[in-house]
Image (spheres, helix red, strand yellow):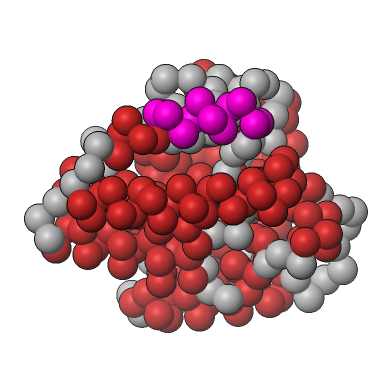
Amino acid sequence: MRSELARLARNLVRGAFLELYLTPKPGLVDLNDPGSHHDLSLERMEASLEVVSGYLCRLAESLSCGEELAKQVRLGIETEQAMLERAGTNCHKGYIFLSGLLLAAAAQAPGGGEQALSEAVAGIASRLFAQPPQGQSNGSRVCDSYGARGIRGEALEGLPALFREALPAYRRELAAGNRGSAVYAMLGRLMATVEDTTALHRCGREGLGTVQEDGRALELMVARRHDFLEFLSRRNEHYVSRNLTMGGVADLLALSFAWLCHTGELEPFPQ
């Protein structure tokens, strides 16, 4: 199990880099620009992911040794602090949680398939959220204000955005022989379905509605073989003008890339 967890940890890092480099993405940092994140840059995001890489390696070792969940939670908290010190930002805070959760679930459901993995995610999340929260984040405040599920609801339900939305969208497009557009089918599905608390925090329900409407438009353009890249570039300009972004979509897209690398359905970076 040790080697398999280490391999998944590497793929979780690869997935985050694949998400970062996917271009264009409305409102998000990519190879063209920082989107609506005026405090970020490609280089700062890369520095943050170096910290995440070390965390996932340590977490895989902790899980392999059978250490307690509390130890693994501390690793995540320490990583958030290290990320702030190294990159000056908490840009991958959500991904630290989601990637760690998926890795921990994989330790509990080795070789059990995606349904077993989803159930393990939900079980670990129920243990994590059984404890009273320590302070409030922007995400938790948004959930309280708008009645949104947020990352907590996503985790407690076993990551449905990953297993029921993103992966099937990718696989359908791939089965139709459209490898080049499959990742954008996945992006569109996530935009259309994720209740993104970053969009809610910045622009309220109107902002979230924009993201979801654009996701549905992207899905349709991919299906009809229209120029969705030009569409995404134009929408990026609109998102920047409104300070709109979609951090939850980005984290779940990275997780989707990671799992597809792990299963061999998406060609990973060289080992």
Residue 71 visible, this angle: no
Q: Give the vertical position of 39 relative to 181 (above or below).
A: above
Residue 195's x, y, as percent?
60, 60
* Overall secondary structure of the magenta section: helix
Q: Quadrant of the C terminus?
A: top left
Residue sitting at x 71%, y 43%: 203
Residue 64's x, y, as percent?
49, 62
Q: Quadrant of residue 173?
A: bottom left
- Is residue 116 within the magenta segment? no
Residue 138's x, y, as percent?
79, 47
44 vs 221, left or right, is right
Q: Give the vertical position of 100 relative to 159 (above or below).
A: above
Tell me where the magenta segment starts and ends, as one range: 233-243
Residue sitting at x 78%, y 55%: 142
235 vs 240, left or right, is left
Residue sitting at x 65%, y 21%: 38
Residue nearest the observer in this picture, 247 or 234: 234
Residue sitting at x 62%, y 51%: 208
Residue nearest the observer in this picture, 218 or 32: 218
Residue nearest the observer in this picture, 103 or 182: 182
Q: Give the vertical position of 77 relative to 122 (above or below).
A: above
